[in-house]
Amino acid sequence: MSIDNGTSQLSFPLRAEILQGRTLIVRDLDVVGVGSLRRQQIQQLQAQNNFILQTHESLIASSVHGIYQAELLNTLQWLRPLRTESGPPLKIDDLLKDSFADIFPHTHTALGFMASRVRDLYLQDMQWSSWLLQDHWRYFVGYLRQKFPEKKDLFELAHWEWVRAWIEVQPFDVGALEPGVVSLNPSLQVVPLTIEQPVLGRDKGLYALVYCDQKATVTERALDVFEAHILDLLQEDRKYSRQQVVQRAQLSEEIGTQLSAQEWEKRYLSLRNDAIILSEKP
């Protein structure tokens, strides 16, 4: 949304190309403490644009105000805005209502005429206790499951949308990879779909969602039973090398159909290529 000549208010998630050479206004409610895709999008824009950070401290829940201040300082270090200023008066309920359709677009459509009612009941029952607008919706999937226990397709759709939105803003600390050791991408979320979701273009099955820093994107992919088993192994409280993962998977008696070492290796490489598992390349 254009504010004046050369100045634009950024809205998230970003949906349109941003013109270069502008001054971009961002709100603390959208950017303080974020990482992953949202931070990378902002940092890519920094090369050709300047930023103004607007703060709304009167809207920050008192229970998290100290954490907010610490996260604000950390954010200023990488955002490097031209200036920080107090933003215009805003109504938190209106902001949260707007954010609902941004986080759950397909769920909003699936709810139809009930969408506004369900959204408003959630806001009525859940006390505002954060500084990021998105965080307020972290219990919505469970809330939806309670309200519509027979609508598995609905809350599985909402779960998918929430997981993706969550991954897009969380600050994941990959750190330095330990030589020779395979690890899971810290952003990895495994989402089961027990019902086909045409709106997502997804069949029933088990799916991995991760943030890939090198590609600056959230990757979604189906997992077969063998890939899921490799991920289970890597969740154990021990360290594996690439060779050990393949050997341990091949020796497993938990899967009826067995693969050759070469086939297990293909599964391993496929997971690594999609940044679902991380390791130093040989």
Image: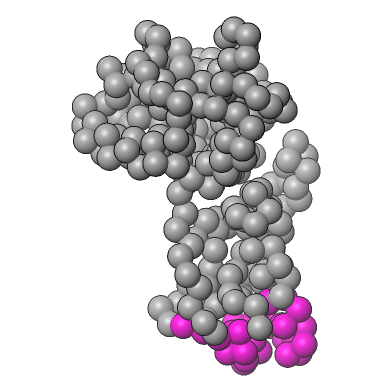
Question: Residue, x 58% and y 75% (percent of image)?
Answer: 279
- Image mark count: 0
Question: Residue, x 41% and y 24% (percent of image)?
Answer: 83
User: Does the magenta run of residues contain 158?
Assistant: no
| 186 over 80 or under it: above or below | below
- Closer-to-camera residue (7/37): 7
The C terminus: image quadrant: bottom right
- On the image, the x and y values in percent for residue 51 come to 51, 26
| 149 over 215 or under it: above or below | above
User: Does the magenta run of residues contain 255?
Assistant: yes
- Closer-to-camera residue (265/203): 265
Q: Is residue 79 left or right of residue 204?
A: left
Which secondary structure type mostly characterizes the magenta part of the structure? helix
Quarter of image, res 277: bottom right
- On the image, the x and y values in percent for residue 44 come to 62, 40
The N terminus: image quadrant: top right
Q: Which range is magenta? A: 239-268
Quarter of image, res 84: top left
- On the image, the x and y values in percent for residue 90 come to 40, 10
Q: Is residue 200 left or right of residue 135?
A: right
- On the image, the x and y values in percent for residue 196 come to 73, 46
Question: Residue, x 75% and y 47% (percent of image)?
Answer: 202
| 149 over 177 or under it: above or below | above
Question: Residue, x 73% and y 70% (percent of image)?
Answer: 270
